[in-house]
Amino acid sequence: MGTEIKLKGDKVIEQIPSTKDKALRINLNENIYGTFAEIGAGQETVRHFFRAGGSSGTIAKAMSAYDKDFSDAVYGIEKDGRYVTESRLKKMLTFEGQLIEERLSREKHPNKMFFSYANTVATIDFAKQFKGHGWVGIRYQIEPDEDYNEIIIHIRFKETDVRLQQETLGILGVNLIYGAYYKYNDPKRLLRYLYDHLDKDQLEIDTINFSGPRFAEVDNRLMSLQLVKNGMTDAVMFNPDGKNILPAAILYKKNILAFRGSFRPVTKVNMDMYEKSLKMFLNENKVDEENTLVIFEITLSNLRSDGEIDERDFMDRAELLCSLGQTVMISNFQEYYKVVEYFANYTKARMGLAMGVNNLVDIFDEKYYRHLSGGILEAFGKLFYRDMKVFLYPMIGENGEIITSDNLKVHPRMKELYKFFKFNGKVVDIVDYDPDILEVFSREVLNMINHGKPGWETMLPSGIAEIIKEHQLFGYDPNKLLKISN
């Protein structure tokens, strides 16, 4: 595979080395030395280094413990009996890294930067129903006397041929090792370079985590955001601790209740909607609280400011939601039916969407579905399939009346369709809402914070105003308030 050239107009902006050139550059660096351990798709990455030439200076060992008993004897037993897991990958990286330290004397190799590269993957099955996925990672040094850094990613194959998946994995592995050594000072670019000589139709990267001294300043939530922004995946998730989590692992067979919003900032209305809809959802048939996951979703379009994604703004919102103990999802799903489709990939259990009246009215707007051959009917077939319900939070109308599912207005052409879903119990009202907070809006709170106006604190959940002030989130400036007071 030859060198790629990226153009902007007629101007060459970047030359991308071929996969062979990348492997060769690593091989010719006399100080990079380590182990390749690959399970599940053949020794696809190390093959590139063998073929590039000069590999004896790089490869200490290449192995593939395919047999499960043999793998257990080397890396230990997995309690859950699963081998394509992050836990397995980390054991492989740690074990191989320690082994090279034990077997090679630092006195004899004072300038060596040791590494262990590993992958554990499952390629497409014989029936071609499951396309396959895997964990890929590298544990490595940038200086001989420095602690180890780590980059771990989770991938999903999109190709439907085992051989093609193997080749894709090999190229990805070379890109990761090359990026780890030569692009570590710019993690965002390193992320993009993982797709050198690969197409997004071949591979999805849905989780990434950086750790170690060279990545001490890297916030992995921002790296997750890059995955969605760059089109590498449709959605990423992180837990209340702010750590990236694999969507497939946390969504698997769960009952899911999701909230979409800007959460800029999260208000009492958001939390009232959450608490009341969750109470109703848990009363649904076949919904077990222990097997229920609540997700606060922010779409990419909700993160854009003047066409660009404001990363600081994103972090502000993430910080607050995490402080409230919530699991956060960032997605590029414009339409609600795509969210439901995404969840349906991982669970057949009950689902619920909590939303305000305005959001539901938007769902019944045909203009959002013109790209679908089946139009709005196709979208609604995907949105309301099986046991999905919408929990509807009321709003105050222009004349001061409370608008619910009974008196909201959709386009005349959509009236009968709306009646059908309401009659069949797919849209249910949240009735025990707090009427005193219906006039609280995020945009108004944000405006008050930005302009130093007093009183916004009472519109937010307990403890949130203190966090905003302490970390000066959303443009909060105590000096603005002082000027107004004076």
Image (cartoon, helix red, strand yellow):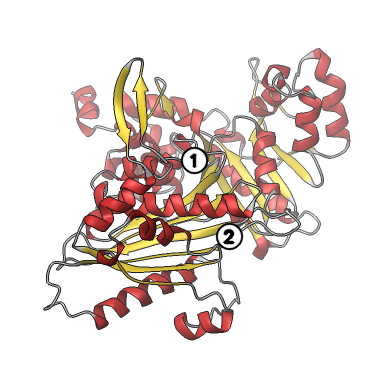
Which residue is denoted by mark 2 in the rendering? 249
Q: Using residue 346 as the reference point, say whether residue 110 is left or right of it.
A: left
Which residue is denoted by mark 1 in the rendering? 232
Name which quarter of the figure residue 13 lies in: top left
Q: Using residue 243 as the reference point, say whether residue 349 is left or right of it.
A: right
Residue 303: mark: none
At 36% across and 15% down in the image, what residue appears?
9
Residue 2 seen in the current view:
yes
Q: Quadrant of the C terminus?
A: top left
Q: Is residue 204 above or below residue 338?
A: below
At 55% across and 62% down in the image, what residue appears?
41
Residue 401: x and y in percent read 68, 21
* Count of marks overlaid on the render: 2
Residue 371: x and y in percent read 69, 21
Which label's residue is closer to the chain start, 1 or 2?
A: 1
Pick the residue in front: 378 or 435.
378
Q: What amino acid type is highlighted by mark number 1?
A: Met
